Image (cartoon, grey):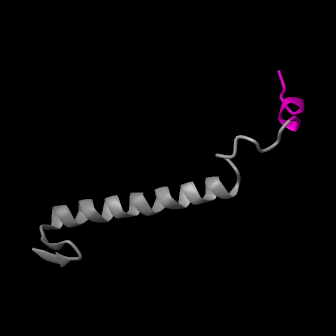
Amino acid sequence: MRHTEYGYVSPIEDYCYRDLERWLADKKKRERRAKKHGVFNLHKGGDDHDKSKTL
């Protein structure tokens, strides 16, 4: 058994917790990066967006 921030867990559980924590940290980074670049801003670009479309 290993002592972690979640208490004493088996090595397999420790591996799963580390994997989930890494995934969560990456998800937060992706969301911050997307927000910074305006992915969630629906009003960004305005009429310029229509002009930049290619068919």
Expressed as whole percent of the image width and height from the top left, the position of residue 22 reads: 39, 63
The residue nearer to you, when weighing 9 against 48, is 48
Question: Which residue occupies 33% across, 58% down?
Answer: 20
Expressed as whole percent of the image width and height from the top left, the position of residue 25 reads: 44, 63
Q: Quick one: quadrant of the N terminus?
A: bottom left
9 part of magenta stretch:
no
Question: Which residue occupies 16% across, 67% down?
Answer: 11
51 part of magenta stretch:
yes
Judge whether 7 appears above or below 38 on screen.
below
Question: Which residue occupies 12% across, 67% down?
Answer: 10
Image check: 54 left or right of 33? right
Image check: 2 left or right of 30? left
Q: How many marks?
A: 0
- Name the outermost residue toward the front: 43
Image check: 32 left or right of 21? right
Judge whether 35 appears above or below 2 on screen.
above
- Name the outermost residue toward the top: 55
Which region is colored magenta? 47-55
Expressed as whole percent of the image width and height from the top left, the position of residue 15 reads: 24, 63
Question: Which residue occupies 25% across, 59% down?
Answer: 16
Judge whether 27 appears above or below 3 on screen.
above
Q: Quick one: quadrant of the C terminus?
A: top right
- Name the outermost residue toward the bottom: 3
Expressed as whole percent of the image width and height from the top left, the position of residue 17 reads: 26, 63
- Name the outermost residue toward the left: 1
